[in-house]
Amino acid sequence: MSEDPGSERVIAGRYRLLSPLGEGGMGTVWRARDEVLQREVAVKEVRAPHGLPDSEIERMYARLEREAWAAARVSHRNVVTVYDVAMEDGRPWIVMELIRGIALSDLLDAEGPLDPQRAAHIGAEVLAALRAAHEAGVLHRDVKPGNVLMANDGRVVLTDFGIATVEGSSALTMTGEVIGSPEFLAPERALGRTPGPESDLWSLGVLLYAAVEGNSPFRQPTPLSTLRAIVDEPLPPPRRAGPLAPVLDGLLAKDPAERTSADSAERELRVVAAGGTAPTRPMGSTGATTRSSQAPTIGAFGVPAPSSATPPQGFGPPPAT
């Protein structure tokens, strides 16, 4: 495909590419015009890296189709609307609602950490999107600031279900492969275990921590050391979270069974967004910080302490079933 937007290439005889909106490691999102319905749309193009085996390219295209299928199942004002999957050059191009605005990641880069009330509002809107997705049997699996759009019309929109899974469908990843941004992965996913809705809630907790603190809590120099920190290290006490701290504590519980539920977390986020304070969790209740010194809870994940020279035994392919 030509990189010159002036060429105005037409996809599937209908979607005229006008100009690039953003580019990442997986490809480009274009501003385009639907010549049939006479409206502007966003078209997501994925380019396979040079030298990638054909089998991997097929998996990439299948994942792209999965994105459209998963997102199209979710109808909610906080989820980007998918209109179509167009085939061109033997690969799918996803046609989506055009969101005019800025990614949360770019907002944080430009403005720095957010105040707790603003972060809580954004978190509540993202959580509303996640609840709608989970009710439809869809896991997002890559909740992070780059996948949250701050629309000019005031909406907060969750996008990029490209690595989402749908309940009851077959997995597209090889056994033991970790999909998603390492610093936002939940402990159970870092260990190769089956994710659930609680895994998306953990990622939201990391997003909120990064939004108010200016950095994600478990980021390390390498992906492996990041995964080990997620599983083994206690949550670094937030310094700027203020009334949001109890919400972070509940969402970032190491054990998914003890994580704050989606409905409780959304209620607490709405309270903080309105200027209130989320209830403080008593010792021994759900929350990563209150349990950080309880070795048996963290040790249940089967990973040795970071000071050990032994490789983390919990990582790698999950046991065959």
Image: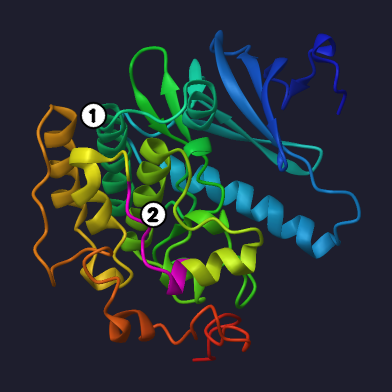
Say whether residue 233 is magenta.
Answer: yes
Say whether residue 278 is magenta.
Answer: no
- Name the main secondary structure of what is drawn in magenta: loop
Query: Could you tell me which residue is drawn at 35 percent across and 57 percent down?
Result: 202
Q: Earlier in the sequence, mark 2 or mark 1?
A: 1
Q: Secondary structure at mark 2?
A: strand
User: Which quarter of the image is occupied by the N terminus?
Assistant: top right
Q: Position of residue 103 (x, y in %)?
A: 50, 27
Query: Could you tell me which residue is drawn at 63 percent across and 63 percent down?
Result: 223
**What residue is pinned by disc 2?**
138
Horizontal placement of 163 versus 244: left or right?
A: right
**Does residue 137 appear in this view?**
no
Query: Could you tell me which residue is drawn at 40 percent across and 56 percent down?
Result: 139
Mark 2 and mark 1: Cα distance apart in space: 28 Å
> Where are the magenta residues, as a range?
230-238
User: Mark on residue 16?
Assistant: none
- Mark 1 nearby-residue class (10 Å; few <14, some 14–19, many ≥20): many
Q: Position of residue 5 (x, y in %)?
A: 80, 14
**What residue is pinned by disc 1?**
117
Image quadrant assignment for residue 239 = top left
Between circles 2 and 1, the one closer to the viewer is 1
Q: Nearer the viewer, residue 110 or 24?
A: 110
Q: Taking 193 as reference, is 299 above or below it?
A: below
Q: Nearer the viewer, residue 298 or 24?
A: 298
